Image (cartoon, coloured by chain):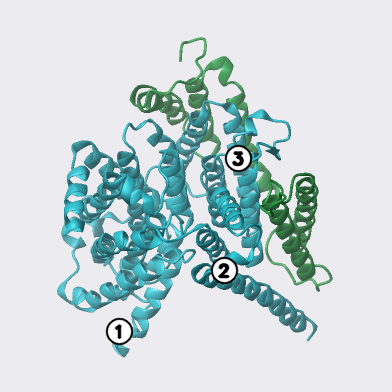
Chain colours: A green, B cyan
Amino acid sequence: MRKENIVTAIVLLLAAAYIVMQSIGMEYKDAEGVPGPGFIPFWSGALIGFLSLLTLYQNVGRAEVKDTQKAIFNKEFFQNVGKLLGASVVAMSLVNFLGMLTCIGLLTGYLSRVLGLKKIKVNIVMAVLTPVIFWLVFSLGLEMRFPEGPLGF
Amino acid sequence: MEILQNLLGGLAIAISPMNLLFCFIGVVAGVLIGALPGLGPSAGLAILLPVTFGFPDPVAGIILLAGIYYGAMYGGSITSVLIGVPGDPAAVMTVADGYPLAQQGRGGPALGICAIGSFIGGTLCVLAFTILGPLLAKVALSFGPPEYFALMVLGLTLVASFAEKSAIKAFQSAAAGIFISVIGLDLVTGLPRFTFGQSKLYEGIDFIVVALGLYGITEILISMEDKAISFKFDRKQLQWRNLLPNAADWAVSKWVILKSTVVGFLLGMLPGSGATICTFIAYAMAKNSAPPERKALFGKGAIEGVAAPETANNAASVAAFVPLLTLGVPGSASTAVLMGALLMFGLQPGPLLWENNPNFIWGLIGSMYIGNTMLLVLSTVCIPFFVRMLEVPFPILNASVMAFILVGAYSLTNSMFDVGLTLFFGLLGYAMKKMDFPAPPMILALVLGNTLENSLRQSLILSQGDIGIIFSRPISGVLITVAIASIAWIIFKSFRNNNSSQSELTQ
């Protein structure tokens, strides 16, 4: 994990530098010595930066230990992100056209399949039953309003 | 006498049909959530929190959430005992003796002692909370902004210090949480901070969005790495007649249960220690105090080795309410989520809550007595039902949980912006988990961030800009010194570990 630690520390160091720079532009302390809007961001950025330097010190120049662990950000990582988050992004971007409950139904049906349940009947039942349960709990029970699609739900 | 009257009033609130129903739902949901590997109490609370928004009475909401919390503490034991897979970190020690017992055909008594230990630990701690809570709240009334500031800094540093893998990463996680908490309009000057021109960020980032992403979505992504589709249990051990421990089991467990209750309560009250550490200490105590012939059984199927951690984690879950409700400072990620829930209900946790909303506090305490009794009944009579529920395939559970998360995020402000942020924090949480950055310090810092900033400002207004006020007052001075010492210790330790590992490599 040494390489990943170094990359993460550099990314966090850059983020910390940005936070500190931005917070300097805000008021650090007022005339009476009371912290202004820049005080807490400044110190949180400074702490992130200091700890990133500490991580770099611990990892840079250190002899490489034989690493038996597989790479962290591997193909599986991106596949999982694509399957779950990608599908969710697509479903949520369709909410204003198809309605929330329809999109939730399509998403759960799809997810139950790509997450490993290869039975089309069960996938369809999921796609139909989940929006019905959500309608009962959220719309009917808790009186929440969701965007509606052309079918009225 | 006043306490007794308040308690009776609280019990009357808790046994109203609606509150009993929510307590029941909370305990059942908590047991199932705790039993499912990955979905711990924090994730369960975050996922189900949006459901409580529509409740007309905040007492019902907190009763449901508290039921989930202590239900989940017990639930972790089911899979730990029956298949050797801990449902949450607090159930890890239960595997050590619970699973060997199940392999010997004694899974039933192991689950039975878990239920009895959880009931005794939980109930005795509620009793202690009933007596100590009002007293501590009165003491906390004397706390000023410097004491609160020091207490919150201490809470954050302890949570980071107790991190399992890297304390440096835990501190970074806490610092990032503080940073996220300042996003939005500054309450004093009205200046937008780190909003990137997005007006939707003016009100800041809701902690629920972060919790749903960091806990809910991340846990689904982690569980996707496991290719198993569902659990398979040996149901023969689970007939309810077999769940009762015999006289010999009870004889070796009774003192362990009482000692673990004390450990769970005392350590559970400390910010940052959490239920997991309590279980390790209770297990070690049980083992060390056992006679030689019993000591040899630990790790191979000693029933008191199951009783100790299960009692301690339920005791700790009740004890965690003490700092939350008396000081307004959560000590763990789960109580941070509960604090967020209280804030969403328009209630400010802390000593004034006891004076301003006694019905809420005593209704909650009353529900804890009832909830623990309910948990005992459910965890003996309904074990076969829970086991059947746990055999539902993971893809169905994960797909349903994801749908819940998305709808929950949307329902916060009826905005797709929050849904997008939740997905972003899900991705961030997954990367953090892979890189060993713990999420609890970030959640805790996010919940405490605004209060921390306000109490610092108030302290410096009091002292006309002199930061020495925090060090010069006795309580805040001690608290902040401990906090600074713990940070210094972490830095020293990381340098020492680095030097020793370097020398090992060069040898």
Relative placement, left or right, of B451 versus B366 is right
Disc nearer the start of the sequence (3/2): 3
Image marks 3 and 1: residues in contact by CB distance under 8 Å:
no
Relative placement, left or right, of B99 versus A25 is left
Classed neighbour count for the residue bearing mark 3: other residues with Cα under 10 Å, few (<14), some (14–19), many (≥20): few
Of all chains, the one bearing label 2 is B
Q: Secondary structure at mark 1?
A: helix
Q: Position of residue B52 (x, y in %)?
A: 38, 36
User: Disc number at residue B294?
Assistant: 1
Disc nearer the start of the sequence (3/1): 3
Does residue B95 appear in the picture of this structure? Answer: no
Spatial CA distance of label 3 from label 1 is: 60 Å
The residue mark sitting in front, 2 or 1, is 2
The residue mark sitting in front, 3 or 1, is 3
Q: Which residue is mark 2?
A: B480
The residue nearer to you, when weighing B10 against B1, is: B1
Image marks 2 and 1: residues in contact by CB distance under 8 Å:
no
Spatial CA distance of label 2 from label 1 is: 44 Å
In the rendered image, the quadrant that contains the C terminus of chain B is bottom right
Q: Secondary structure at mark 3?
A: loop
- Residue at 61%, 48% in the rendered image: B429
Relative placement, left or right, of B430 versus B252 is right
In the rendered image, the quadrant that contains the N terminus of chain B is bottom left
- Residue at 22%, 56% in the rendered image: B376
Disc nearer the start of the sequence (2/1): 1
Of all chains, the one bearing label 3 is B
Spatial CA distance of label 3 from label 2 is: 25 Å
Of all chains, the one bearing label 1 is B
Q: Which residue is mark 3?
A: B187
Relative placement, left or right, of B229 versus B55 is right
**Mark 3: which amino acid?**
Leu
